[in-house]
Amino acid sequence: MTTVRQSGWRSLSTTDRRTLLLLAMLQPLISASLRISGYANTKRRLQWLSRHPTPRTANATDLEQANQLARFAAIAGRRSPLQTTCLRQALAIHFLLRRKGLDPRIKFGVRHPGSHPEMHAWVELEGSPLDPTANAYAWFARTQH
């Protein structure tokens, strides 16, 4: 798999293009659901829609593909006309990984760099964070939800 920044849209495989477009469409839908239904109901709906008959443990290839999915989610989030925060991206990644039968976990963190706390959401698969800016996690106290 390649990254969009390095080689551009034309050099992406058909599968990678499809994934990027799916993420670009999915994140605004998740955003609308969050506004209408809230986090708990949105997550519950996405889990129901992404249930898989044969859950399995992720292997090395799954982890590589999941990291690529997270990179694509970040790209789609940056290029979206609507605000797609880390939470929207995490829910989209979580949804797509569950459809493959994997067991991702959404994680939340908070840091207090000054008087205003900053929050972040990301996905972990088999205990490994899927955020392309993984070094930022040192700044966040990890909590699981």
Image (tube, helix red, strand yellow):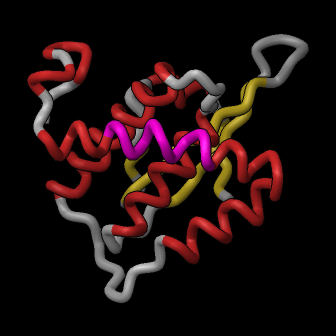
Q: Is residue 61 above or below residue 70?
A: below
- For the residue pair 51 and 60, the one nearer the viewer reads as 51
Image point (42%, 36%), residue name = 73
Most distant residue in the bottom direction: 53
Quarter of the image with the N terminus in it: top left
- Side of 11 where 125 appears, left or right: right
Q: Which residues are magenta?
A: 20-29
Residue 109 located within the stretch drawn in magenta: no
Most distant residue in the right direction: 115
- For the residue pair 20 and 135, the one nearer the viewer reads as 20
Image point (40%, 25%), residue name = 75
* Rendering coords of residue 7 (x, y %): 14, 16
* Rendering coords of residue 81 (x, y %): 58, 22
Asked where in the image residue 90 lies, by quadrant, the reply is: top right
Image point (56%, 51%), residue name = 91
- For the residue pair 4 and 139, the one nearer the viewer reads as 4
